[in-house]
Amino acid sequence: MSRLSQFLTAFKQTKLSILVDDLSSSRAALVAPAQDITPEQVNRILTISGGLTFVALSPERASAFLLSTMTRPSSLRPQTLPVSQMAQYVSVEAREGITTGISAADRAKTLHILGAEIAQPRALVKPGHIFPVETRSGGVLVKTAIPEGALDVVTMIEATDAALFVDLLTKDGELMTERQAEDCARQEQLPLVTLSELIRYRLQQESLVQRVAEATLPTTLAGEVRAVVYRSHIGDIEHVALVKGDVRGDTPVLVRVQAEHTVPDVFGGFSPATRSHLQNSLQEIGERERGILLYLRRPFMDPKGIAVQHLKEPPTSHSVRRMREYGVGAQILRDLGVTHVELLTSSTNLLEGLPSFGITVVAQHPIPQHVSTSGHTV
C-alpha cells in the first residue's frame, strides 16, 4: 500500500488530517470534511490551532450557494496582493439554529449546511464567521495550494466537495513549518500528507489524457511520421506526439519530451534554444527510423511561450511543472504502447520523474548537433 493510500485509509477513520504545502510556501493546515463535522471536532480543531475557519468549495458548489467574491478597494486589486492571498467569498453563517455564530456548535451547524449533499442557499446569511474560499477545477493538478489540496483529499474519501481547513499556528501565532506540522501530527495522532505527494498520486492514478485525432505528417527532418493528438484534462489543452516507426513493445524507444515555447519554437533564437532542440531531435529520430517527439503545450501561455499564472495564485515552481509534465507525458507514452525509453535531453541530471509513472528510462543521451542543408549546425 502506498503512503498516500495509507493516508486516505487513516483519514477516513479520523475525519481530520494535516496537509502541508511543501512546494510553494511554509504553510500547513488541519483539514476535515465539512459534511458531517461535529461540534467536538470543531472544538478540537480550534484547540489545536486558533486560526480562521476556512472552507474550500468547488466552483459548482459555490455557484449553487450563490456566493459572491469579496470586493476589495482599487488599491488592493489582485495584481498587487501578496502571492499567498486566497480568493475568498463573502463570509457566511447559518440562518437558523445558532446564537452568536462563534461557538463550536454554531460553526458546525454552518459547516453542515456548506457540506450538505444538496446546497440550500437560503439556509445561509451573509456575512458570518465561516470563510468560504474559491478553488480551481482540477484541484492540485491545476493550482498548487492548500485550498485545492484540502478539497482533493476530502473528495478522495467520498465526502462532498466542501473542505474545512484551518492554518496550523504556533503558540506565537506564526505559521507552522513542515517540521513543526510533522511534530503536531505525531502528538495528535493525525495522518499527514504533502501537496507534492498528492500531486504525484493523482498523476499516477487518474486518466489525464484522451486520444482525439491522428494523421500522417510529412516532415523534412524525420520523413513521414504519425501525428497523434491528445487532449489533456489539465487545462483542457492539446498535446501532440510525432511517432516514427513501430514503437510498441519492450524494446527501448528514443524519446524527446519538449514543453512548448511559442516564439523560439516558431521563429528561432538562442535563449532558450528550443527550436534547435526540436530540429535536432526530429533528425535523430528520423535517422534511427524509430522514436517519438512529444510536444507538450502549457496552459495560459503568453506570446513568448511563458506559462502565465492566474493573478490570484502563486507562481508554479519548476519542480511542480516538471512533475505534471512527466505525468501527462508518461500517460501519452503508455497509450502509444511504450514502456522503455532512451531519453534525448539537454539536462545533465537524471530525469527521475518518468520511472515513478510507469516508464523505465534505460538510457539518457544529449541532444545531438546536426548539420543543416545549408552547412550550419542547428
Image (spheres, grey):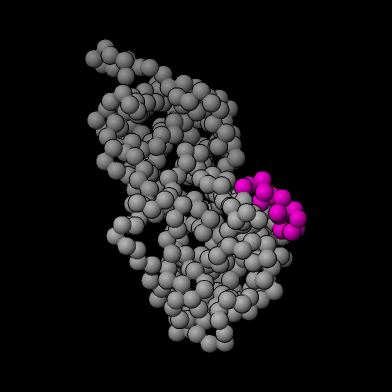
x and y percent of residue 234 in the render?
Answer: 43, 52
Q: In the figure, 277 relative to 114: above or below? A: above
Whether residue 182 is visible? yes
How far across and how far down the image is residue 328, in percent?
48, 45
Q: Residue at x 58, y 62 (%)?
A: 51
Query: Residue 339 location in percent, x, y?
Result: 56, 37
Q: Residue furthest bottom?
A: 96
Q: Is residue 152 above or below residue 224?
A: below
**What is the chief secondary structure element of the magenta stretch?**
helix
Residue that appears at 55% across and 79% down: 101
Side of 179 relative to 307 (left or right): right
The reply to whether the magenta stretch includes residue 222 is no
**How far from the left and from the top, in percent, is residue 357?**
57, 42
Residue drawn at x 28%, y 37% as measured from the top left:
304
Q: Is residue 135 above or below residue 80?
A: below
Q: Compare residues 43 and 204 and report the one nearer the observer.
A: 43
**Where is the C terminus found, in terms of image quarters?**
top left
Magenta span of residues:
177-190
